[in-house]
Image (cartoon, rainbow, N blue to C red):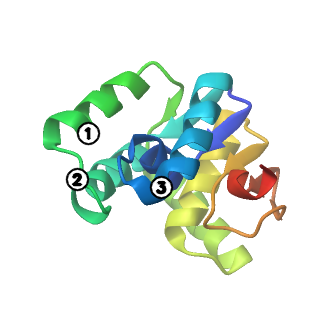
Amino acid sequence: MIADVMLDTNIVVYAASKAPEDAAKAARSLDLIRGGHFGISSQILQEFYVTATRKIRVPLSHDEALDWIEQLEELPCIPVDQSLVFQGAEIAHRNKISYWDGAIIAAAERLLATTLYTEDLSHGQLYGSVRAVNPFLEH
């Protein structure tokens, strides 16, 4: 699988957000989704469902969240398997970041993505072959 960019969960959640406070981030996230060749991982789909239906200001319904997941199904998607868990744990340990962020970086590496759009990691930081970019700082 090959994609230029990996999207972190928060980018997809902002794209789906209906909260007025998230309007600017939603617009930027939708631009990223519409404009690029990107990939995701099954971890991101899982986190999206939980966050979008339970943790955001204006939660999505079950059906709305599944509609988003269905729209994303044609993208390159890295499954979480035993070797990805191991690789994610190694990346997390080496970089002193959360396991979850390490697993997303590991999935990005499998996609051959060189950019990870996220607001959870240090903007501009290189993690192996993957650079974390906060897209909300660029515009």
Residue 44 shown left or right of residue 95 in the figure? left
Q: Are marks 1 and 2 in contact (CB under 8 Å)?
A: yes
Residue 121 shown left or right of residue 82 in the figure? right
User: What whole-number distance in Å separates the C-alpha atoms at marks 1 and 2?
Assistant: 7 Å
Q: Which residue is mark 3?
A: 22
Above or below: residue 110 compared with residue 8: above
Q: Out of 127 and 11, give the one closest to the viewer.
A: 11
Residue 1 visible in the current orientation: no
The quadrant where residue 28 appears = top right
What residue is rendered at 24% in x and 54% in y? 59
The numbered dot on residue 65 is 1
User: Which is more N-terminal, label 2 or label 1?
Assistant: 2
Rendered location of residue 6, percent (x, y): 63, 41
Type of amino acid under label 3: Asp
Q: Which residue is mark 2?
A: 53
Identify the element where label 2 is drawn. Answer: helix
What residue is rendered at 60% in x and 59% in y? 87
Rendered location of residue 23, percent (x, y): 50, 49
Residue 129 visible in the current orientation: yes
User: Which is more N-terminal, label 3 or label 1?
Assistant: 3
